[in-house]
Image: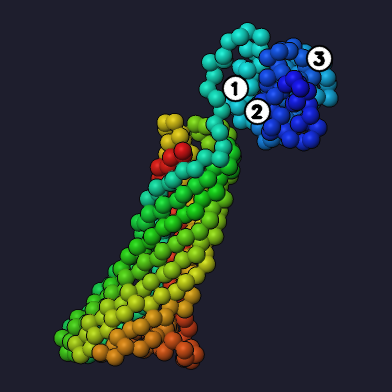
Amino acid sequence: MDAAARALSLFKDKKYRAAIPFFKQALIQKPGDYKLYYYLGSCQYKAGRPREAVVNLTLSYNLRVDMKLEDFVHRLRATLSSQEIEWVDAQVAAYGTGKTPDVPAPIEYPQFGLRLEPEVSFINLAQFTAAAQAYTFYANSIQGTDPGYSFSGIVPNSLFGGIVEPVLRMDSHLEFGIPLSYLPAGTVTGKIEDPQNGNSAISFDLSAFLGGLDVILLTGDRPLQFFASIGPRLASIQVGINYTGASQTANGTLNSTVFGGAAQVGLEWEIANNFFLTPSIGYRWLQAGPLTGNVNIGGVTNNYRMEFDPGSTNGSLIAYVPSNAPDPPGMSHFDLDLSGPTSSLTLSALF
Protein backbone atom coordinates (compact mmCIF):
# COMPACT_ATOMS: atom_id res chain seq x y z
CA MET A 1 0.00 0.00 0.00
CA ASP A 2 1.49 3.33 -1.08
CA ALA A 3 1.61 6.42 1.19
CA ALA A 4 -1.53 8.05 -0.27
CA ALA A 5 -3.63 4.89 0.11
CA ARG A 6 -2.35 4.34 3.64
CA ALA A 7 -3.11 7.98 4.55
CA LEU A 8 -6.66 7.80 3.15
CA SER A 9 -7.31 4.57 5.04
CA LEU A 10 -6.26 6.18 8.32
CA PHE A 11 -8.33 9.27 7.50
CA LYS A 12 -11.47 7.17 6.97
CA ASP A 13 -10.80 5.47 10.32
CA LYS A 14 -10.60 8.95 11.92
CA LYS A 15 -6.98 8.37 12.93
CA TYR A 16 -6.06 11.90 11.96
CA ARG A 17 -2.75 12.28 13.79
CA ALA A 18 -1.48 8.98 12.43
CA ALA A 19 -2.45 9.97 8.89
CA ILE A 20 -0.49 13.26 8.83
CA PRO A 21 3.02 11.84 8.09
CA PHE A 22 1.62 9.62 5.31
CA PHE A 23 -0.11 12.57 3.61
CA LYS A 24 3.16 14.52 3.82
CA GLN A 25 5.00 11.58 2.25
CA ALA A 26 2.38 11.35 -0.51
CA LEU A 27 2.78 15.06 -1.30
CA ILE A 28 6.50 14.54 -1.93
CA GLN A 29 5.46 12.19 -4.72
CA LYS A 30 2.51 14.37 -5.93
CA PRO A 31 3.30 17.98 -4.92
CA GLY A 32 0.48 19.48 -7.03
CA ASP A 33 -2.40 17.31 -5.80
CA TYR A 34 -4.99 19.63 -4.25
CA LYS A 35 -6.85 16.70 -2.68
CA LEU A 36 -3.79 15.65 -0.69
CA TYR A 37 -3.41 19.21 0.64
CA TYR A 38 -7.08 19.22 1.56
CA TYR A 39 -6.84 15.92 3.44
CA LEU A 40 -3.59 16.93 5.16
CA GLY A 41 -5.09 20.26 6.26
CA SER A 42 -8.24 18.50 7.47
CA CYS A 43 -6.17 16.07 9.55
CA GLN A 44 -4.18 18.93 11.08
CA TYR A 45 -7.39 20.79 11.91
CA LYS A 46 -8.89 17.68 13.55
CA ALA A 47 -5.61 17.17 15.46
CA GLY A 48 -5.77 20.68 16.96
CA ARG A 49 -3.09 22.25 14.75
CA PRO A 50 -5.00 25.16 13.18
CA ARG A 51 -2.10 27.16 11.77
CA GLU A 52 -0.69 24.17 9.81
CA ALA A 53 -4.25 23.40 8.69
CA VAL A 54 -4.64 26.92 7.30
CA VAL A 55 -1.43 26.54 5.26
CA ASN A 56 -2.45 23.32 3.57
CA LEU A 57 -6.13 24.16 3.08
CA THR A 58 -5.05 27.45 1.50
CA LEU A 59 -2.75 25.58 -0.88
CA SER A 60 -5.66 23.27 -1.72
CA TYR A 61 -8.06 26.02 -2.83
CA ASN A 62 -5.21 27.90 -4.53
CA LEU A 63 -4.70 24.82 -6.72
CA ARG A 64 -8.44 24.36 -7.31
CA VAL A 65 -10.98 27.09 -6.53
CA ASP A 66 -13.39 26.11 -3.76
CA MET A 67 -15.38 29.04 -2.37
CA LYS A 68 -16.80 27.05 0.53
CA LEU A 69 -13.34 25.90 1.61
CA GLU A 70 -11.95 29.41 1.18
CA ASP A 71 -14.66 30.82 3.46
CA PHE A 72 -13.86 28.17 6.11
CA VAL A 73 -10.14 28.99 5.96
CA HIS A 74 -10.81 32.73 6.38
CA ARG A 75 -12.82 32.01 9.52
CA LEU A 76 -10.06 29.74 10.82
CA ARG A 77 -7.42 32.42 10.11
CA ALA A 78 -9.37 34.83 12.31
CA THR A 79 -8.58 32.63 15.34
CA LEU A 80 -4.81 32.93 14.82
CA SER A 81 -2.47 35.54 16.28
CA SER A 82 -0.70 38.04 14.02
CA GLN A 83 2.57 36.11 14.44
CA GLU A 84 0.86 32.88 13.37
CA ILE A 85 -0.72 34.58 10.34
CA GLU A 86 2.68 35.96 9.32
CA TRP A 87 4.11 32.44 9.49
CA VAL A 88 1.18 30.97 7.54
CA ASP A 89 1.52 33.53 4.76
CA ALA A 90 5.26 32.89 4.51
CA GLN A 91 4.67 29.14 4.13
CA VAL A 92 2.06 29.67 1.41
CA ALA A 93 4.27 32.19 -0.42
CA ALA A 94 7.18 29.73 -0.40
CA TYR A 95 5.12 26.96 -2.04
CA GLY A 96 6.96 25.50 -5.02
CA THR A 97 10.15 27.55 -4.51
CA GLY A 98 12.03 24.87 -2.59
CA LYS A 99 13.09 27.51 -0.06
CA THR A 100 12.41 27.64 3.66
CA PRO A 101 10.71 30.90 4.69
CA ASP A 102 12.81 33.08 6.97
CA VAL A 103 9.99 33.52 9.51
CA PRO A 104 10.23 32.25 13.12
CA ALA A 105 7.95 29.35 13.90
CA PRO A 106 4.93 30.35 16.03
CA ILE A 107 5.08 29.63 19.73
CA GLU A 108 3.97 26.18 20.77
CA TYR A 109 1.40 25.96 23.55
CA PRO A 110 0.88 25.20 26.34
CA GLN A 111 3.79 27.00 28.00
CA PHE A 112 4.72 26.71 31.66
CA GLY A 113 6.13 29.66 33.54
CA LEU A 114 6.77 31.41 36.83
CA ARG A 115 5.95 34.89 38.05
CA LEU A 116 7.70 36.84 40.82
CA GLU A 117 5.48 39.69 41.95
CA PRO A 118 6.44 42.23 44.64
CA GLU A 119 3.27 44.04 45.62
CA VAL A 120 2.18 47.16 47.50
CA SER A 121 -1.31 47.03 49.05
CA PHE A 122 -3.35 49.73 50.72
CA ILE A 123 -5.56 48.75 53.66
CA ASN A 124 -7.97 50.37 56.07
CA LEU A 125 -7.77 48.84 59.56
CA ALA A 126 -10.91 50.65 60.66
CA GLN A 127 -11.44 49.02 64.06
CA PHE A 128 -7.78 49.35 65.06
CA THR A 129 -8.00 53.02 64.04
CA ALA A 130 -11.18 53.43 66.11
CA ALA A 131 -9.43 51.83 69.09
CA ALA A 132 -6.47 54.21 68.78
CA GLN A 133 -8.81 57.20 68.55
CA ALA A 134 -10.73 56.01 71.62
CA TYR A 135 -7.51 55.73 73.64
CA THR A 136 -6.48 59.22 72.51
CA PHE A 137 -9.88 60.66 73.50
CA TYR A 138 -9.74 58.91 76.87
CA ALA A 139 -6.23 60.23 77.50
CA ASN A 140 -7.37 63.78 76.78
CA SER A 141 -10.47 63.41 78.95
CA ILE A 142 -8.54 62.53 82.14
CA GLN A 143 -5.78 65.12 81.80
CA GLY A 144 -7.34 67.06 84.68
CA THR A 145 -7.05 64.19 87.18
CA ASP A 146 -4.01 62.45 85.73
CA PRO A 147 -1.98 65.06 83.83
CA GLY A 148 0.84 62.63 83.06
CA TYR A 149 -1.43 60.16 81.25
CA SER A 150 -0.79 59.99 77.49
CA PHE A 151 -1.33 57.61 74.60
CA SER A 152 0.55 57.16 71.33
CA GLY A 153 -0.14 54.59 68.65
CA ILE A 154 0.56 53.55 65.08
CA VAL A 155 -1.90 51.87 62.71
CA PRO A 156 -0.40 50.93 59.30
CA ASN A 157 -2.34 51.77 56.15
CA SER A 158 -0.23 49.92 53.59
CA LEU A 159 1.79 46.73 53.28
CA PHE A 160 4.51 45.31 51.07
CA GLY A 161 4.14 41.65 50.13
CA GLY A 162 5.35 39.12 47.62
CA ILE A 163 3.70 36.60 45.30
CA VAL A 164 5.14 33.53 43.58
CA GLU A 165 2.84 32.26 40.84
CA PRO A 166 3.35 29.19 38.66
CA VAL A 167 1.43 29.77 35.41
CA LEU A 168 0.20 27.71 32.49
CA ARG A 169 -0.38 29.62 29.23
CA MET A 170 -2.89 27.62 27.20
CA ASP A 171 -2.69 29.84 24.12
CA SER A 172 -1.77 33.42 23.25
CA HIS A 173 -4.82 34.82 25.08
CA LEU A 174 -5.50 32.51 28.05
CA GLU A 175 -3.49 31.63 31.17
CA PHE A 176 -4.12 29.92 34.48
CA GLY A 177 -2.06 30.77 37.56
CA ILE A 178 -1.67 29.46 41.10
CA PRO A 179 -0.63 32.50 43.19
CA LEU A 180 1.08 31.82 46.52
CA SER A 181 1.71 34.91 48.62
CA TYR A 182 2.80 36.16 52.00
CA LEU A 183 1.49 39.49 53.27
CA PRO A 184 3.23 40.99 56.31
CA ALA A 185 0.47 43.50 57.04
CA GLY A 186 2.51 45.36 59.63
CA THR A 187 2.31 45.99 63.34
CA VAL A 188 -0.31 47.97 65.21
CA THR A 189 1.23 49.50 68.32
CA GLY A 190 -0.10 51.36 71.31
CA LYS A 191 1.77 52.85 74.26
CA ILE A 192 0.33 54.35 77.43
CA GLU A 193 2.42 56.47 79.78
CA ASP A 194 0.76 56.72 83.18
CA PRO A 195 2.93 57.91 86.10
CA GLN A 196 0.15 57.14 88.58
CA ASN A 197 -0.64 53.52 87.62
CA GLY A 198 2.33 52.46 85.50
CA ASN A 199 3.13 52.36 81.83
CA SER A 200 1.89 49.74 79.35
CA ALA A 201 2.43 48.80 75.72
CA ILE A 202 0.69 46.50 73.27
CA SER A 203 1.44 45.37 69.75
CA PHE A 204 -0.50 43.36 67.15
CA ASP A 205 1.61 41.73 64.43
CA LEU A 206 -0.59 41.12 61.38
CA SER A 207 0.21 38.69 58.56
CA ALA A 208 -1.49 36.43 56.04
CA PHE A 209 -0.59 33.47 53.84
CA LEU A 210 -2.65 33.13 50.66
CA GLY A 211 -3.12 30.58 47.91
CA GLY A 212 -5.54 30.66 45.03
CA LEU A 213 -6.31 30.29 41.34
CA ASP A 214 -6.23 33.01 38.67
CA VAL A 215 -7.87 33.04 35.26
CA ILE A 216 -5.93 35.48 33.05
CA LEU A 217 -7.27 36.82 29.76
CA LEU A 218 -4.95 38.66 27.35
CA THR A 219 -5.71 40.83 24.32
CA GLY A 220 -3.49 41.82 21.42
CA ASP A 221 -0.23 40.12 20.51
CA ARG A 222 3.27 40.00 21.85
CA PRO A 223 5.37 41.94 22.74
CA LEU A 224 2.59 44.11 24.32
CA GLN A 225 -0.61 42.56 25.62
CA PHE A 226 -3.22 43.98 27.95
CA PHE A 227 -4.56 41.52 30.48
CA ALA A 228 -7.24 41.10 33.13
CA SER A 229 -7.28 38.42 35.80
CA ILE A 230 -9.61 37.33 38.57
CA GLY A 231 -9.69 34.43 40.99
CA PRO A 232 -10.49 33.15 44.48
CA ARG A 233 -8.12 33.15 47.45
CA LEU A 234 -7.87 30.94 50.53
CA ALA A 235 -6.07 32.77 53.33
CA SER A 236 -4.71 32.00 56.76
CA ILE A 237 -4.60 35.24 58.77
CA GLN A 238 -2.59 35.58 61.98
CA VAL A 239 -2.57 38.22 64.70
CA GLY A 240 0.32 38.00 67.16
CA ILE A 241 -0.42 39.76 70.47
CA ASN A 242 2.19 41.06 72.90
CA TYR A 243 1.10 43.13 75.91
CA THR A 244 3.23 44.42 78.76
CA GLY A 245 1.61 46.25 81.67
CA ALA A 246 2.57 47.40 85.12
CA SER A 247 1.17 44.30 86.79
CA GLN A 248 0.37 41.88 83.96
CA THR A 249 1.60 40.55 80.63
CA ALA A 250 -0.18 38.76 77.81
CA ASN A 251 0.93 37.14 74.58
CA GLY A 252 -0.42 34.72 72.03
CA THR A 253 -1.51 34.21 68.43
CA LEU A 254 -5.02 34.40 67.01
CA ASN A 255 -5.93 32.88 63.65
CA SER A 256 -8.67 32.91 61.05
CA THR A 257 -8.99 30.94 57.79
CA VAL A 258 -11.14 32.66 55.18
CA PHE A 259 -12.04 32.84 51.49
CA GLY A 260 -11.40 36.00 49.52
CA GLY A 261 -10.56 37.03 46.00
CA ALA A 262 -8.38 39.23 43.82
CA ALA A 263 -8.61 40.98 40.45
CA GLN A 264 -5.96 42.74 38.34
CA VAL A 265 -5.55 44.63 35.08
CA GLY A 266 -2.24 45.54 33.50
CA LEU A 267 0.13 45.46 30.56
CA GLU A 268 2.37 42.49 29.81
CA TRP A 269 5.56 43.53 27.99
CA GLU A 270 7.87 40.88 26.53
CA ILE A 271 11.27 42.46 27.17
CA ALA A 272 13.17 39.43 25.83
CA ASN A 273 12.26 36.07 24.37
CA ASN A 274 9.71 34.60 26.83
CA PHE A 275 10.66 37.09 29.59
CA PHE A 276 8.03 39.61 30.64
CA LEU A 277 7.74 42.76 32.73
CA THR A 278 4.20 43.47 33.88
CA PRO A 279 2.96 46.62 35.68
CA SER A 280 -0.54 46.16 37.09
CA ILE A 281 -3.15 47.49 39.49
CA GLY A 282 -5.89 45.56 41.20
CA TYR A 283 -8.04 44.95 44.24
CA ARG A 284 -7.98 42.20 46.85
CA TRP A 285 -10.93 41.10 49.00
CA LEU A 286 -9.70 39.62 52.28
CA GLN A 287 -11.72 39.90 55.48
CA ALA A 288 -11.01 37.72 58.48
CA GLY A 289 -13.68 35.74 60.23
CA PRO A 290 -13.62 35.25 64.02
CA LEU A 291 -10.03 35.48 65.27
CA THR A 292 -9.38 32.75 67.84
CA GLY A 293 -6.33 31.21 69.48
CA ASN A 294 -4.41 30.60 72.68
CA VAL A 295 -3.47 33.67 74.70
CA ASN A 296 -1.39 33.58 77.87
CA ILE A 297 -2.63 36.20 80.32
CA GLY A 298 -0.77 36.50 83.58
CA GLY A 299 0.71 33.01 83.22
CA VAL A 300 -2.60 31.30 82.41
CA THR A 301 -3.28 30.15 78.85
CA ASN A 302 -6.80 29.87 77.48
CA ASN A 303 -8.44 29.88 74.07
CA TYR A 304 -9.89 33.31 73.33
CA ARG A 305 -11.75 35.16 70.60
CA MET A 306 -10.94 38.77 69.74
CA GLU A 307 -13.94 41.10 70.19
CA PHE A 308 -14.78 44.74 69.47
CA ASP A 309 -16.40 46.68 72.31
CA PRO A 310 -17.62 50.11 71.11
CA GLY A 311 -19.22 50.80 74.49
CA SER A 312 -15.95 50.73 76.46
CA THR A 313 -15.52 53.71 78.82
CA ASN A 314 -11.78 53.46 79.40
CA GLY A 315 -10.61 53.67 75.79
CA SER A 316 -10.08 49.93 75.37
CA LEU A 317 -12.31 48.86 72.46
CA ILE A 318 -10.52 45.53 72.04
CA ALA A 319 -11.56 42.69 74.33
CA TYR A 320 -11.06 38.93 74.59
CA VAL A 321 -13.72 36.37 75.45
CA PRO A 322 -13.59 32.55 75.61
CA SER A 323 -13.71 31.32 72.01
CA ASN A 324 -16.76 29.10 72.59
CA ALA A 325 -18.77 31.82 74.34
CA PRO A 326 -21.41 33.98 72.62
CA ASP A 327 -20.74 37.65 71.93
CA PRO A 328 -21.23 39.66 75.14
CA PRO A 329 -23.96 42.34 74.96
CA GLY A 330 -22.82 45.26 72.81
CA MET A 331 -19.77 43.42 71.46
CA SER A 332 -19.11 41.78 68.10
CA HIS A 333 -16.35 39.80 66.41
CA PHE A 334 -13.32 41.97 65.72
CA ASP A 335 -13.39 42.98 62.06
CA LEU A 336 -9.90 42.58 60.59
CA ASP A 337 -10.22 43.64 56.96
CA LEU A 338 -7.10 43.42 54.77
CA SER A 339 -9.02 44.30 51.60
CA GLY A 340 -7.81 47.13 49.43
CA PRO A 341 -6.27 48.27 46.14
CA THR A 342 -2.97 46.77 45.02
CA SER A 343 -0.13 47.79 42.75
CA SER A 344 2.66 45.54 41.49
CA LEU A 345 5.49 45.15 39.00
CA THR A 346 5.96 41.53 37.96
CA LEU A 347 8.87 39.71 36.36
CA SER A 348 7.93 36.42 34.72
CA ALA A 349 9.33 33.79 32.40
CA LEU A 350 7.75 31.11 30.21
CA PHE A 351 9.49 27.89 29.23
The quadrant where residue 94 appears? top right
Task: Kindly give the residue lying farthest to the left in the view shown.
Answer: 195
If you read the primary sequence from the N terminus, does the residue marked by circle 3 or circle 2 appear first? 2
Task: Look at the numbered discs 3 and 1 and tell me whether their residues touch, using CB distance below 8 Å.
Answer: no
Determine whether, in the image, residue 72 is placed left or right of residue 118.
right
Q: Is residue 306 visible?
A: no
Q: What is the x, y in percent for residue 23? A: 71, 23
Determine whether, in the image, residue 307 is placed left or right of residue 91.
left
Task: From the image, tell me which residue sits under label 3.
Answer: 64
Q: What is the x, y in percent for residue 344? A: 41, 48
Residue 164 to residue 4: above or below = below
Amino acid type of the residue that numbered disc 2 sits on in the rendered structure: Arg
Q: Secondary structure at mark 1?
A: helix
At x 63% / y 22%, what residue is drawn? Answer: 88
Q: CA distance from mark 1 to mark 2?
A: 8 Å
Q: CA distance from mark 3 to mark 1?
A: 22 Å
Q: In the rendered structure, find residue 51 and report the number of the disc placed on it.
A: 2
The quadrant where residue 201 appears? bottom left
Amino acid type of the residue that numbered disc 3 sits on in the rendered structure: Arg
Task: From the image, tell me which residue sits under label 1.
Answer: 87
At x 42% / y 83%, what residue is drawn? Answer: 305
Task: Look at the numbered discs 1 and 2 and tell me whether their residues touch, using CB distance below 8 Å.
Answer: yes
Determine whether, in the image, residue 151 is placed left or right of residue 218.
left
If you read the primary sequence from the N terminus, does the residue marked by circle 3 or circle 1 appear first? 3
